[in-house]
Image (spheres, rainbow, N blue to C red):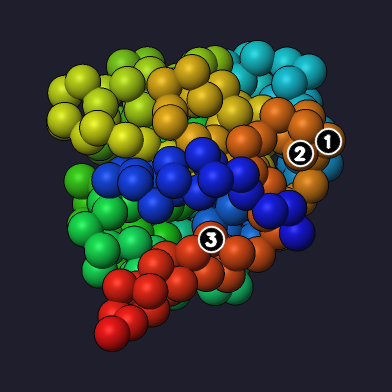
Amino acid sequence: MSQPSPSVLQAWLGADCVCFDVDSTVCVDEGLDNLAEFCGVADKVKALTNKAMNGDMTFEESFEARLSMMGLTRQKLDQFVSQHPPKLTPNVVNLVQLLEQRNKRVYLITGGVSDLVKPVLTALTLPDNRLISNRLLFDENTGEFLGHDRSCFTCRSGGKAAAVKHLRVDLGYRSVAMIGDGVTDMEARSECDLFVGFGGNVERAQVVAGADWFVRDFRELAKPLLERDANCNMP
């Protein structure tokens, strides 16, 4: 466990908006990889996911290649979602509750797709407007896969930084922390006050080296919040 510097701790406690990556951060696994297994192309898609997360391939290249090989339909996607509830990382629900109780607004910013992530919002008791993700397009009559909405922030490299900028400039948050396991999460650092690398599910050397604070358990992030409460309540 790494100990945060005083300035990092101050940034964490002072954040009024905390953004979480979803795959391998809020959830123990990768949603698109699981969908690919359901579609019978798991190995090919997982290799592309790792290339993007390790910075060896642009996110947009990886995202479009993964989608194109799955043979998706609206019906197949709905069937997958109904059969695969989200697997949350231990202690994340408690951390999200602690943050929300302290008026620190929690957002999920993910390169995944909204259909897979909305059940995660429900599990965390967060409203729909706290999700920034990708949206898949299907023919309304046949269910045929038509592609993805290219106006979404996170369909391209650097999209998470653009999403955080949107939160600051358009929604008025003054201090933003980002938590994630991948290089695509660390790209948001340019727009954040704090980037926390998370290694509880997957540990990536570039993220360990580049994070302001690296943790492997969400209790490490909850602890300073609880300690501050205890200090404030001392006589």
Using residue 194 as the reference point, say whether residue 42 is left or right of it: right
Q: Quadrant of residue 93?
A: bottom left
**155, 184: nearer the viewer:** 184
Q: Amino acid at mark 2?
A: Val
Q: Residue at x 52, y 69 (%)?
A: 223
Location of residue 29 with respect to 169 vertically, above or below = below
Disc 3 is placed on an element classified as helix
**180, 27: nearer the viewer:** 180
**204, 194: nearer the viewer:** 194
Using residue 39 as the reference point, say whether residue 47 is left or right of it: right
Q: Amino acid at mark 1?
A: Ala
Q: Quadrant of residue 63?
A: top right
User: At which x and y percent is residue 174?
Assistant: 24, 32
Q: Residue at x 68, y 47 (%)?
A: 214
User: At which x and y percent is residue 42?
Assistant: 76, 45
Q: Quadrant of the N terminus?
A: bottom right
Numbered badge on residue 205: 1
Location of residue 126 with respect to 22 vertically, above or below = below
Using residue 75 as the reference point, say whether residue 26 is left or right of it: right
Mark 2 and mark 3: span between their CA atoms?
16 Å
Is residue 134 visible in the rendered image? The answer is: no
Q: Residue at x 36, y 36 (%)?
A: 176
User: At which x and y percent is residue 128?
Assistant: 23, 51
List the residue tagged with mark 2. 208
Q: Quadrant of the C terminus?
A: bottom left
List the residue tagged with mark 3. 221
